[in-house]
Amino acid sequence: MIARITIVGRPNVGKSSLFNVLSGHKIAIVSDIENTTRDIVEYQMHDAENHISYILADSGGITIGSDDEILSDIRNRVQESITRSDLILFVLEYDKLTALDEEIAKLLRRSGKKVIVVANKADNIERMNEAYALAALGFDDFVITSTAHDRGLDILKLAMIHNLKEQGLNYEEAIYDDGMLKLAIIGRPNVGKSSLINAITGTNRAMVRDMPGTTRDSIDSIVEWNGEKIVLIDTAGIRRSGKIGSANLEQWSVLRSEQSISRADLVAIVIDADEGITSQDKHVVERALEEKKGIILVCNKWDKILARPTVQTLEEREAQRAADKARSEEEKARKAKGRGNKLPPLPETPLKPHNRAPEMSTTDERFSGSTIMNRYIEYIGHEFDFISYVTPVFTSAVDGKRVDTILDIAFKIRDERNKRVKTGVFNDFLSQIIYQHAPTGNRKAHKPKIYYGSQVDINPPKFMISVNNESHFHFSYKRYIENRIREFFGFSGTPIIVELKGRESIFKKWGGLKDERLKDDAERHHEELEKNREEVEKKNERKSAPKGEKPERKGRRTKKERMEENNDE
């Protein structure tokens, strides 16, 4: 099993800075504010030179004696991470050993884990000499470092690897595959993103509290589903810039979340079904559309909708359906008995849907869970009419309902984003839709024309259509082409790019032409015009010369001119 190393210490001793330097990436948020790190941020390290892989985890600052709910949750999370770890990096400041440090040292001794004491912030020789006093804590390994000046980090890495190999934890895993599907869980604050991650992975890694803004770091978790691996990225809640101010901690969290959207292949946008769709939710969707990412719309907290008093429970719906069915059978039997044997029963002919009477009572249909879900889908279609190609998923992270459906849909959208349409098939499709609806222009003097088209890229799918001039087309016709592409070829869950490219006019100046051959022809034509102009000027000069006086001639003279010169002599 892969080894695990956790960085612990009191708040604001440089744990996140050390984590970023060791991992080689700016993953954890670094700030002078205490308790900035709240989640257990993990990064899988691979040391090819020493042939070992391990997980490096950054933890929140440990505090003792505080009744604050967040700080208490951080303590419990750090203690759980210590229990799961094989090696502990105990980070201290080079010149301070506080009572809180001594309490953490007692906690680590009781855990029985291997500990390396890291005296951080020793930026010069004087500070390094002062740091040796921390060796009195009595742990086996002691390393002096300075993350600001990259001092002692190589010694620390060797000490870490030596401790792991001593414990027999020399596991080496393959290098992280960038080809894995990456799914970012995004949304506004407090919609249940971390709860969904925990429900999918089955672990309590991201902080879950009914308080906005509890997740501040983007956390990656690798999950295997149906034989394939997928990377789940939990992010902080995204709000509009006007809501978060400037130069504060939440601003950096939002920036980190937006960076996670950029490196993800798909995004699962989580909305609170109980609160409904807000303007912040639309802002999050717009952010995903700007990046051209595949979209899964997750309506979380559906258990709260079903728990409303106006919604029937499953047992009540089944009982109501059984009663309605029995009542319907009794009515049929009574009518058949009233007719007697005078006429045979008429055959049951299918009626049109709008003429058929409902089998269940109107009250039951109105308040059943399926009916509310259908009406919620209509509500989503009205609010998010610009992403009609996205199918919503109704989940409950508390009950674990339909959370696995998110992964199934993610792999389907991945296949849709990598789908490619053959050029011949696409041009046949263009001919068909043009015949059904001719191109709509926005100028009376110019008629829009479509010549041919092809799919030029995937992930996201991109179609290039050659036209006479893109400015001649009305904007609605481009939307018509996109809708028909989805109708014929699918591409559900992913945005597609349709680009109209106009042909270059050969009558433009050669400086604006992109074709080098046309440019050479234009230069050649320009040279011929200059040559003809010079010849015309010479002819005009000879005609305008006075009689008896001949213009000076350059080059070889004719035989007649030479004879005239001899006679004059």
Image: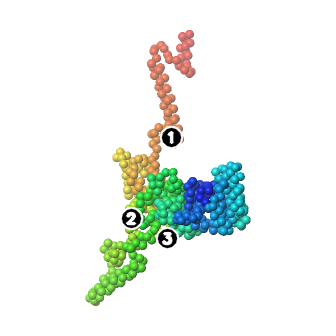
| Residue at image location 35% in from the left, 73% down from the top | 366
> Which amino acid, mark 2?
Tyr
Tell me the number on the disc at residue 285. none
Find numbered disc 2 in the image and state the secondary structure of the residue it sits on. helix
> Which amino acid, mark 1?
Leu
Please, which residue is most extreme toward the top here?
569
Residue 262: percent from left, percent from top: 53, 55
> Which amino acid, mark 3?
Val
| Residue at image location 39% in from the left, 54% down from the top | 477
Residue 379: percent from left, percent from top: 38, 64
The residue that mark 1 highlights is 518
Task: Please tell me which residue lies in front, 104 or 19.
Answer: 104
**Residue 202 lies in quadrant:** bottom right
Q: Are marks 1 and 3 in contact (CB under 8 Å)?
A: no
Find numbered disc 3 in the image and state the secondary structure of the residue it sits on. loop
The residue that mark 2 highlights is 379
Residue 196: percent from left, percent from top: 51, 66
Tell me if mark 1 has few (under 14), some (14-19) or many (20+) residues whose alpha carbon lies within 10 angstroms of its own. few
- In this rendering, position of residue 123 left or right of residue 366: right
Looking at the image, is mark 2 or mark 1 nearer the viewer? 2
**Residue 374 lies in quadrant:** bottom left
Task: Please tell me which residue lies in front, 401 or 212.
Answer: 212
Task: Please tell me which residue lies in front, 138 or 497.
Answer: 138
Tell me if mark 3 has few (under 14), some (14-19) or many (20+) residues whose alpha carbon lies within 10 angstroms of its own. some
Find numbered disc 1 in the image and state the secondary structure of the residue it sits on. helix
| Residue at image location 50% in from the left, 64% down from the top | 193
Q: Earlier in the sequence, mark 1 or mark 3?
A: 3
Judge whether residue 427 can be spotted in this image: no
For the residues labelled 2 and 3, the Cα–Cα distance comes to: 24 Å
The residue that mark 3 highlights is 398
For the residues labelled 2 and 1, the Cα–Cα distance comes to: 56 Å
| Residue at image location 35% in from the left, 84% down from the top | 326
